[in-house]
């Protein structure tokens, strides 16, 4: 306990993860909404500051995120339940950092975006947001499967509450659906984790939930397939991939703006992150065997999501279905198992968070004014709301993958990499680019252009300074990433390359006939050896 | 040598202008908007001139000047943002900056009374920046960035009058049709990068020439690698340069302001596809099958669009179909291997078509927005400068000897003649049709009696100097631009062809079209095209000069079917709607209504139902009656015994 507190007090990952949750406690005593909002904004900005403080002191000087790990005084990760080999083990590297930074940055954005939209129970709403942040960061940094599972579930509850309490008319239905879908997946993952750990205990003679230990486990293909299925299903529901995507439109449509932004911006990425971090490295042969099936589903997702988005009459639902298509691209990149495609996929996770996050904010701003999201109620809005029109066009262009904005970089790299390893699939997926233009430009057409058809739209107020402030950072990032992506690709390159090398090395071997442990060298890319708290880990 | 440090400024200045005017906002005073809006392209033009001077100051064969600005991506995928000034991009650079600036100037007069004046110039500057990116890029990626950028500006400018219904819809159509082309372009880029690991032009062309397997064997779709890439890139060109079957967006694009039609949809952007094919000429030389395909598509588009142009009554629509048709000529040239002649025609066309569009703009301006030629007539007296400059443009496009269009079109026909006689005949007929429909336009607009309302007649006025000066300059250009490429019968060698030679070298020497024609043949060809052009002009003169629309009515009475078919543009839009758009929409609806809502949600519903059913059934056991529980207990004990004993 002592060493845990010491860890939490220092400039560590533990502090980053726990700070939001701890900072939610004073909310119990805050009654006035205004005070609560300001307090939340301050907390979220402190968290941003803490993140950059950590990155500043631990990040590599050459712009590459190093592998860093929280270690106790004995130079080892903290033990949590020693009997079962469960540890409180947080590690950050180039794969988790970009997502973590995005998550932390989106919280103040979401707060500014929800300022008016949330009308009741601000302290509870704020607490949900903060716990969600902690859950997300924990899941991103967890290097122990038990710990990962805990954080994975911690993310679930606040989101359930956000949809169910502050959502629209069918919020209860949407919240329950969201909960059941995700829960069904995660329970299977829990079973898979336990099976995996039990196998490890049998082979190694000791219990361990540590990611690096479990990575050494070489399983026969049959067992791998079952375990992979358990993990993959949990992640793919979260992504969400066709055909387990139907919870998403409902959740988005009913969720309040802030909930949608967090959901699209971060939560979905945990699915693709988990697939990259756990499902592929732990079960390489199985994921390779499942590749054709999953590629097909990813491709269907890209085309199908786009088609379904096209026929929506509700603006938010259109954006929600666009996520299915966009995440299909990310999955295509991951499945391609190529470095360029992986870089593109990771960047595309960020890009989707920025552009879709912005789109949800914009839909919310419109909803705050008109209390509807139906296209038939809009039209010609560029006239009364030129600034809104600018941001909507800008975010749409980013989403549609226009060069010099962020979306293009990710898509382009995914397609380049995927073409190399999958050929036809990449070309077919390229057609999704055409469809994206069709449904997104339909959205612009129906909201912004044409004559004003509804009298009440004639005098709509344009965006306020607060609203502009919430959108501007996203827009700036979209432009900067699009113009100079090198600076955003470099930090993750090393970590992705290491993971990929290891994955490919494992694929070269014939699968074991019986469960066995691989020699230590096979996991050379992972941190080992005595290091002090927070210090950069030698590779 | 300043050029290698200055190239980046050429696209950057217009971008900066767009950003600055965007930030200053619509409430900024008119003088500051103008200063930025016109200053940026002017500065860009001046830098371009400096760079061109540097380039031409070099001894022939002038080596290309290159500037690497920064690394766009690093690591396993390494692509630079870099610019290239060689013979080919020099021609394009001059056309784009020079014509571009003139049209900016013209716009300041034309758009003076429009509400979104500042917005217009933000878009127009953005367009200039993107177009220059496209032209100057030294690799496929930078080219693609510009390619998409001009597509976006096209969308925004077509939909400039966004409060109306048609313009934004036309803009959307343009963007989406172009995206279909971009799909091909992107696929081509993927294939190139996959094979060579680079997208840099000269590197790619060197490697593909050295790669023996590129032009043989099967790569995909039964094509060789070179053919596959050539086809993919050409699909991109079809979209941007409005060729069959992707030309349908260009006529609709006339919904934008007229200077936009002149700059984007006649002089520069729509020619990007021709530039791309000429740039990638090495690949096309390795792909004779696709080259033939390019030539056939070009010839068909040329004649197809020209026939539609015969029956249009909107002055801008006639010019739009004419543009599609002329672009067809350029692809015909590229397809038969006369890349330099394609670029030559691109250049001369930029002058005379920009002139014609701006002239039509001047007419529309004077007519208070009227575009229907049936309401015009006799405008010659009211708009003397517009008429005389238009007159020059008319003769140039019709192919009257001595003017720009004659030399470039004739060069294309000569090259086609030596490559493929059938295509030559199509090209020749198209030349006649072109002369006819352009003459029809001129006679209906400028000759005869005024047919519009009294109010319109009262308002007729010549345009301000900002509009007439560009007209005059472009008219001069429409005459002299052709003289840089005099045919071999008049000059020893075609100077333009010679100039472009370092970039456009035939891979197997001695296969170069027009040079092999004897002088006699060439004179005969010239006579044929001049004869056809004059025939077209005189026929139109007879029909329309005095009688005006009466001739048209007589024709439509005699052949109503043909008239309706041409006026209805062969009903291609309707066909696409019927066989592509609506089925896709139906599929989308089925995906949503059947797959999503019925199949997936339904099967989940079944799961929910079964769960609830089980719960409901199990509930019956909980009766609250002690005797029932005693019975369960007894049955349980029996079952347990059974299991343990057996």
Image (cartoon, rainbow, N blue to C red):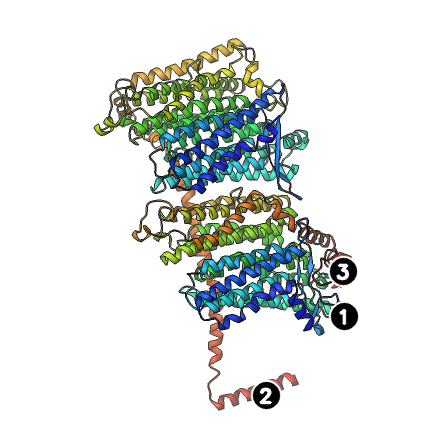
Q: Position of residue A159 (x, y in %)?
A: 51, 65
> Which disc, if any, is residue B637?
2
Foreground pick, A251 / A396: A396
Q: How many marks?
A: 3
Using the image, name the chain to which the residue with label 3 belongs: A
Q: Which residue is mark 3?
A: A518
Q: Which residue is mark 1?
A: A205
Instruction: Give SS at disc 2.
Output: helix
Q: Position of residue A464 (x, y in %)?
A: 41, 53
Give the quarter of the figure containing the C terminus of chain B. Answer: bottom right
Using the image, name the chain to which the residue with label 1 belongs: A
Please check whether the numbered discs 1 and 3 fall on a single chain: yes
**Location of residue B251 with respect to A510 vertically, above or below:** above
Using the image, name the chain to which the residue with label 2 belongs: B
Asked if residue B279 lies left or right of residue B376, the reply is right
Q: Residues within 10 Å of mark 3 (few under 14, many from 20)?
A: some
Q: Residues within 10 Å of mark 2 (few under 14, many from 20)?
A: few
Q: Earlier in the sequence, mark 1 or mark 3?
A: 1
């Amino acid at each position: 306990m002592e060493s845990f507190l010491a860890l939490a007090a220092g400039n560590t990952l533990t502090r980053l993860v726990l700070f939001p949750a701890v900072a939610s406690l004073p909310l119990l005593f805050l009654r006035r909404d205004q005070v609560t909002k300001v307090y939340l904004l301050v907390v979220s900005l402190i968290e941003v500051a803490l993140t950059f403080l950590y990155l500043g002191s631990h990040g590599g000087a050459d712009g590459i995120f190093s592998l860093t790990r929280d270690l106790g005084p004995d130079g080892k990760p903290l033990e949590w339940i020693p009997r079962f080999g469960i540890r409180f083990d947080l590690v950050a590297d180039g794969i988790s950092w970009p997502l973590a930074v995005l998550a932390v940055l989106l919280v103040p954005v979401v707060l500014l975006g929800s300022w008016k939209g949330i009308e009741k129970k601000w302290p509870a709403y704020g607490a949900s947001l903060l716990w969600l942040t902690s859950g997300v960061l924990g899941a991103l940094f967890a290097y122990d499967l038990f710990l990962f599972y805990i954080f994975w579930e911690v993310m679930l509850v606040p989101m359930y509450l956000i949809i169910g309490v502050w959502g629209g008319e069918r919020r209860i239905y949407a919240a329950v659906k969201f909960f059941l879908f995700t829960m069904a997946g995660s329970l299977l993952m829990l079973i898979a984790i336990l099976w995996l750990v039990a196998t490890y205990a049998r082979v190694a003679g000791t219990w361990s939930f540590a990611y690096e230990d479990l990575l050494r486990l070489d399983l026969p293909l049959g067992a791998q397939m079952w375990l992979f299925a358990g993990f993959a299903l949990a992640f793919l529901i979260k992504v969400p991939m066709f055909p387990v995507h139907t919870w998403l439109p409902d959740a988005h449509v009913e969720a309040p703006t802030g909930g949608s932004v967090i959901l699209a911006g971060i939560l979905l990425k945990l699915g693709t992150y988990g697939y990259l971090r756990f499902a592929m490295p732990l079960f390489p042969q199985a994921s390779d065997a499942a590749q054709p099936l999953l590629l097909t589903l990813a491709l269907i997702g890209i085309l199908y999501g786009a088609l379904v988005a096209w026929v929506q009459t509700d603006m938010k639902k259109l954006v929600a279905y666009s996520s299915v298509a966009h995440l299909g691209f990310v999955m295509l990149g991951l499945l391609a198992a190529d470095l360029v495609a992986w870089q593109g996929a990771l960047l595309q996770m960020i890009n989707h968070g920025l552009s879709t996050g912005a789109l949800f904010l914009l839909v919310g701003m419109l909803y705050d004014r008109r209390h509807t999201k139906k296209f038939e109620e809009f039209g010609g809005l560029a006239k009364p709301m030129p600034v809104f029109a600018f941001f909507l066009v800008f975010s749409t262009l980013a989403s549609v993958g226009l060069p010099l904005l962020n979306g293009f970089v990710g898509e382009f790299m995914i397609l380049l990499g995927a073409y190399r390893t999958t050929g036809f699939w990449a070309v077919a997926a390229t057609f999704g680019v055409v469809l994206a233009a069709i449904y997104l430009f339909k959205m612009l057409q129906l909201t912004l252009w044409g004559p004003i058809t509804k009298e009440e739209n004639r005098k709509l107020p344009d965006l306020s300074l607060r609203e502009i402030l919430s959108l501007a950072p996203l827009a700036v990032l979209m432009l900067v990433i699009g113009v100079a992506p090198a600076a955003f690709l470099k930090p993750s390159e090393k970590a992705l390359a290491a993971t990929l090398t290891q994955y490919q090395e494992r694929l070269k071997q014939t699968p074991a006939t019986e469960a066995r442990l691989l020699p230590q060298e096979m996991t050379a890319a992972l941190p080992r050896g005595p290091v002090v708290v927070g210090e950069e880990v030698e590779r | 040598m300043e050029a290698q440090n200055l190239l980046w400024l050429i696209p950057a200045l217009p971008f900066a202008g767009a950003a600055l005017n965007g930030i200053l906002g619509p409430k900024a005073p008119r003088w500051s908007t103008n200063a930025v809006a016109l200053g940026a392209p002017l500065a860009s033009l001046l830098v371009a001139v400096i760079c061109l001077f540097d380039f031409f100051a070099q001894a022939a064969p002038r080596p290309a000047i290159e500037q690497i600005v920064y690394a766009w991506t690093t690591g396993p995928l390494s692509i630079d943002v870099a610019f290239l000034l060689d013979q080919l991009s020099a021609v394009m650079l001059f056309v784009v900056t020079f014509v571009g600036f003139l049209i900016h100037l013209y716009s300041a007069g034309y758009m003076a009374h429009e509400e979104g004046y500042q917005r217009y110039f933000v878009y127009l500057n953005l367009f200039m920046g993107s177009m220059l990116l496209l032209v100057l890029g030294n690799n496929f990626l930078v080219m693609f960035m510009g390619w998409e950028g001009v597509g976006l500006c096209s969308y925004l400018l077509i939909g400039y009058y966004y409060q109306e219904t048609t313009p934004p819809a036309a803009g959307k159509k343009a963007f989406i049709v172009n995206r279909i082309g971009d799909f091909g372009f992107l696929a081509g880029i993927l294939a190139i990068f996959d094979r060579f690991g680079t997208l840099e032009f000269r590197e790619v062309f060197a490697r593909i020439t050295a790669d023996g397997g590129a032009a043989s064997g099967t790569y995909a779709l039964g094509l060789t690698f070179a053919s596959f890439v050539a086809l993919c890139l050409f699909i991109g060109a079809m979209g941007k340069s409005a060729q069959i079957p992707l030309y349908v967006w260009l006529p609709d694009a006339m919904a934008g302001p007229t200077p936009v039609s002149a700059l984007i949809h006649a002089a520069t952007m729509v020619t990007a596809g021709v530039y791309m094919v000429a740039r990638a000429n090495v690949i096309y030389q390795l792909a004779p099958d696709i080259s033939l395909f390019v030539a056939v598509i070009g010839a068909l588009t040329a004649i197809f669009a020209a026939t539609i142009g015969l029956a249009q009554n909107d002055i801008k629509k006639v010019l739009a179909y004419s543009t599609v048709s002329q672009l067809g000529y350029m692809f015909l040239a590229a397809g038969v291997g006369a890349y330099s002649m394609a670029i030559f025609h691109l250049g001369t066309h930029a002058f005379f078509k920009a002139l014609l569009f701006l002239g039509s703009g001047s007419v529309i301006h004077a007519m208070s927005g009227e575009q229907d030629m049936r309401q015009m007539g006799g405008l010659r007296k009211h708009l003397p400068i517009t008429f005389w400059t238009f007159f020059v443009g008319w003769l140039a496009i019709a192919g009257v000897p001595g003017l720009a269009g004659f030399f470039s079109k004739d060069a294309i026909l000569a090259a086609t003649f030596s490559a493929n006689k059938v295509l030559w005949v199509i090209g020749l007929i198209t030349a006649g049709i072109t002369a006819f429909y352009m003459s029809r336009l001129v006679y209906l607009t400028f000759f005869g009696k005024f047919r519009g309302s009294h109010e319109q007649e009262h308002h007729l006025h010549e345009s301000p100097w900002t509009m007439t000066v560009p007209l005059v300059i472009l008219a001069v250009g429409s005459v002299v631009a052709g003289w840089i490429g005099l045919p071999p019968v008049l000059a020893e060698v075609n100077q333009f062809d010679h100039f472009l030679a370092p970039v456009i070298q035939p891979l197997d020497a001695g296969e170069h079209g027009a040079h092999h024609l004897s002088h006699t043949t060439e004179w005969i060809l010239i006579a044929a095209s001049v004869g056809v052009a004059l025939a077209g002009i005189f026929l139109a003169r007879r029909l329309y000069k005095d009688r005006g629309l009466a001739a048209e009515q007589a024709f439509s009475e005699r052949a109503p079917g043909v008239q309706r078919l041409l006026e209805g543009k062969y009903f291609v839009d309707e066909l696409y709607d019927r066989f592509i758009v609506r089925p896709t929409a139906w599929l989308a609806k089925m995906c949503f209504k059947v797959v999503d809502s019925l199949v997936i949600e339904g099967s989940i519903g079944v799961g929910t139902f079964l769960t609830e059913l089980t719960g409901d059934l199990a509930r019956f056991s909980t009766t609250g009656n002690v005797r029932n529980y005693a019975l369960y207990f007894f049955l349980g004990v029996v079952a347990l015994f059974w299991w343990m004993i057996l």
